[in-house]
Image (cartoon, grey):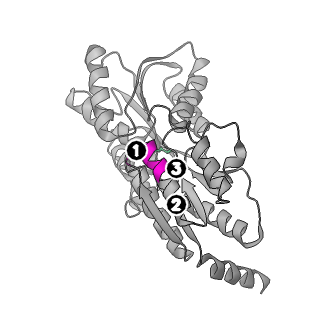
Amino acid sequence: ATALSAVALSAAHAEDLTIGFSQIGSESGWRAAETKVSKIEADKRGIDLKIADAQQKQENQIKAIRSFIAQGVDAIFLAPVVATGWDAVLAEAKEAEIPVVLLDRTIDTPDESLYLTAVTSDTVYEGKVAGEWLAEKTAGKCAIVELQGTVGSSPAINRKKGFDEAIAVHAEMKIIRTQSGDFTRAKGKEVMESFLKAENGGKNICAVYAHNDDMMIGAIQAIKEAGLKPGSDILTISIDAVPDIFKAMADGEANATVELTPNMAGPALDAIIAYKKDGTVPPKWIQTESRLYLPDTAAAEYDARKDLY
Ligand code: GYE
């Protein structure tokens, strides 16, 4: 009975909350799913979630945050496109006593009081899982090309770091080329085409590591167009677990992915509801799970996810 009334109380309170969400854009399938899930999770809790699409631009995110402050929202969710440059605008939010929750990416700041909590995966760990999987698959011998995410974004920095650490202990694993594909399919394909040209039509390449699945989907297309077989001539390892990568895995054209849940908003909304209700301060980091998926379960995982995306 106590639990039930607590739920009823928070639900009643939640109905009055308005939250502004500065979303990055729609660069990837994962991002589009995150936006969709955020709306569903807000609706479930009776919260008015206003989503502003920044079209990948930090200046648009800063404008959106200022507009949310001017509207007097109860909280701000921010998926920061890059890690630096947030101190001034977040200080304005703090001044206005509006709590900020970071979603899926983190920021570099000397002042952690500028945000209440961050709901993210451990992106260094994701890179490490990817590197360790590839080391095992290739017995520690592999010439790798890397498609990095958006320059200056926390997942691009951290996924590189974790991967580099994992392969550093294997003398014959090397990243022979690395470049940003900005987390998009189109750029992933374009950069992979240049890697293939530069590396003997792809014959020098053992594997592609992409910081997200969308860039890998583009790379797979480029590999096929170059007359090689992705998944066997060139191995693939990427991150997100979007439906299309499971499709590629089921078809033998991709080898592995590390899952990133698109439901960052659910835990963030619960943290804000509790904070607004009785001042409960959440942990500074609410960590979501990261799990490696291989082709054996790919067909089933595709079916389980295709409608959510
Ligand atoms: O992996 C990628 C997206 O910020 C962790 O951003 C997120 C990343 C995700 O565009 O697909």
- Label 1: which residue? 56
Dot 2 or dot 3, earlier in sequence: 2
Q: Are the residues flagged by discs 2 and 1 in contact, CB closer than 8 Å? A: no
Q: Tell me if residue 163 comes above or below residue 217 in the rendering.
A: above
In this rendering, would 167 be left or right of 246? right
Q: What residue type is labelled 2?
A: Phe
Along the line of sight, the residue nearer the viewer: 227 or 93:
93
Indicate whether 64 appears above or below 212. Answer: below
Badge 2 density bin: few <14, some 14–19, many ≥20, Cα 10 Å:
many
Q: In this view, does 244 lie above or below 10?
A: above
Residue at label 3? 79
Q: Residue 193: x, y in percent? A: 26, 26
Camera-side residue: 33 or 253? 33
Q: What residue range appears in magenta? A: 55-63
Residue 280 occupies quadrant:
bottom right
Residue corresponding to mark 2: 68
